[in-house]
Amino acid sequence: MDIPYTVHARPDTGLYNAKIGIWLFLASEVMLFGGLFSAYIFLRVGADYPWPVHDLDVTLGFINTVVLIASSVTVVMAWAMLKLRKFAWYRINMAITVICAGVFMFNKSLEYKAKFSHYAVKLTDGTMLTGHLPNGYHVKFDGVKELSITIAGGNKAVDADPVDVVLPAIEGDVPKFKFPSGTEQELNAATFGELQKATRKAAYEAYQAKRDGMIADAEKVLAAATTPHAIYEAEKRLAIARNYNVIPDTKITLVAASPIKFAANTSDIFGYTDTTLTFCDGTIVTGKLTDDKMTLQVDGVDARGVAQSEKSLAFDHRYLGDAWQKAFVENRDHHIATFEHDYPTRDKTRSATLQKDSLFFKIHTSTPPAEGKAHGDKHGAEAHAPAENHGSGHDYPTVVLEKKDFTFFSNFTPKLNTYYAIYFTLTGLHGLHVVAGALVLLYFLAFDGKRLRQDPEHLANRVEVGGLFWHFVDLVWIFLFPLLYLL
Amino acid sequence: MADNVEAIQKSIKWYLIIGGILILASGATVWLSFVELPTHSLNILVGMILATIKATLVALIFMHLNHERSLIYKILLFTVVLAVVLFALFIFSHEDPLVFPGFYAPVEQQ
């Protein structure tokens, strides 16, 4: 069956059907992105931290803006060329559009990648240090002899998975373990699977025995009941017994053949004390905490959250020290003096830019700059962070932070703050639209050759509809770019 | 709509001009964002006005909304009204009686 009105307009609407379809779809898309922009406004109005301005890579964002605008021109040109029956130019313009989409997504991947390997650490006095963790961050335990595993009865959100969660955290060789059966064997998926199966079976049998006992007791009580109230109570008890469905958890201890050392990634644990380490599968190990210090290569000190910025904990003698403090103060005072000179009547405390330039100190060398050189740098630390291992030729001071001195750390992902949450949501959804739009346009270019030869007017309508979607993608970016990168 | 050959040939020139204007306007947005206006809110306002102008150009010229059938405008009218309501929602957070200034201020300040 042919779809009607794909080429010529429907008499009552004056439009071919796909055009009404795409506009209705775009209307729903406006509401989708509108809801997210509304969320952006709420998050920004309610943010309890300095909202990042110029923190992302503005150059990369601007290049992507130009790329999207260029692709918007080429897609509408492709449609026009098709209408003029200049097929070669149509193909060229469509190809450029698809290439632009690829360039956009490539740049976006560079931008995303840098954020996953760049960290912010919040110190107890409110200072935010930014930088890289060259070795990751691990909590180290020594002298562990036992794993206390809790095998859940029934389906529970947290269930024992020591093979995937606990074993990778062991430093050195993995010893054999003494199982509850008394045998000493390796802990792997097969042996743990058997143990889990047997434990669950025993737990289920215990549950059934308990339930049967409860029912038998309740039935006896019911048989002996004489008054209406006693019968009512006994029937209630029986119903409870019949509905009893609590399958107990089982705690199992696996004893290691030799003491184990752990270096657990913090994303794999629930928490720890000086003597116990709890993994996110519920497994608890007992031993001695040997190291929970964090080694950070610092590329920025953000003291906007500190009342007396020069006294930030970052400049403690154990960390960056006096020389960096001096450079920080010089940079801060330089920016304040410049602002006072340029805008003598303005309130310094109300300039977000001045707050950032003066109190968010960016570091590009391992040693403090010479006197008189520590100012004038407006580079955003986050924006200029290279993807991995500081491969940009820059060098950075390294500090070893004690756990008691920091309260929170995260890479530049949604976990860090609401800005990065909405940044990833908006740009991620927009990126998906870029990919979807590019695939549709690529399909027209690569697989619609027959239609191009036999029914170019139909293909022109298709390209127009695909182009309308593409322009919408560009239109969303026109607002995203200033809101996330610039303002 | 521009579907006759002459009109399309004319509009090709305009597509290129508008593309150039959009790129220049994007450059201006970047530059203005680094200019220290009296308040940062003013920077945001200027940036959003520029973005709205750019979006309008895209919609009018590239998406052909400068010469479209009335049905499309009717669909978009609903969309625009609802979107404006969405953006205005945050105003209600300022009307929340729990954060009304006099509600929790210490007695001596009232």
Image: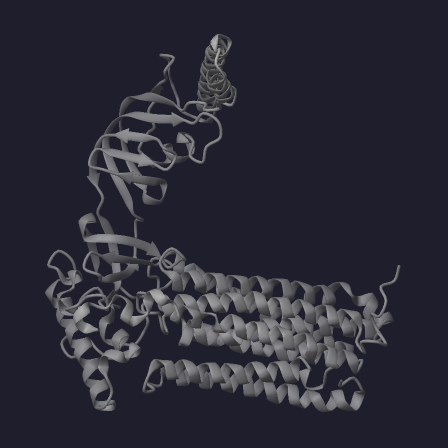
Q: How is the rendered protein coloured?
A: one colour
**Dividing the picture into quarters, in which one does residue B108 lie?**
bottom left
Q: How many marks?
A: 0
Q: Is residue A24 left or right of residue A282?
A: right
Q: Position of residue B38 (x, y in %)?
A: 32, 87
Residue lying farthest to the front in this orientation: A227
Query: Front-most of A47 and A221?
Result: A221
Q: Position of residue A450 (x, y in %)?
A: 83, 66
Q: Is residue A429 left or right of residue A44?
A: right
Query: Front-most of A157 and A468?
Result: A157
- Residue at x 29%, y 60% (from the top left corner): A131
- Residue at x 20%, y 87% (from the top left corner): A340
Q: Position of residue A431 (x, y in %)?
A: 55, 64
Q: Is residue A374 left or right of residue A486?
A: left
Residue lying farthest to the right in this orientation: A1
**Dividing the picture into quarters, in which one does residue A26 lie?**
bottom right
**Dividing the picture into quarters, in which one does residue A4 lie?**
bottom right
Does A30 appear above or below A205? below
Quadrant (top left/top right/bottom left/bottom right) for the N terminus of chain A = bottom right
Does A278 appear above or below A48? above
Quadrant (top left/top right/bottom left/bottom right) for the C terminus of chain A = bottom left
- Residue at x 48%, y 84% (from the top left corner): B49
Does A82 appear above or below A218? below
Specify whether residue A86 is in view: no
Query: Front-most of A299 and B83?
Result: B83
Q: Position of residue B57 (x, y in %)?
A: 59, 85
Q: Is residue A2 left or right of residue A236?
A: right
Specify whether residue A329 is in view: yes
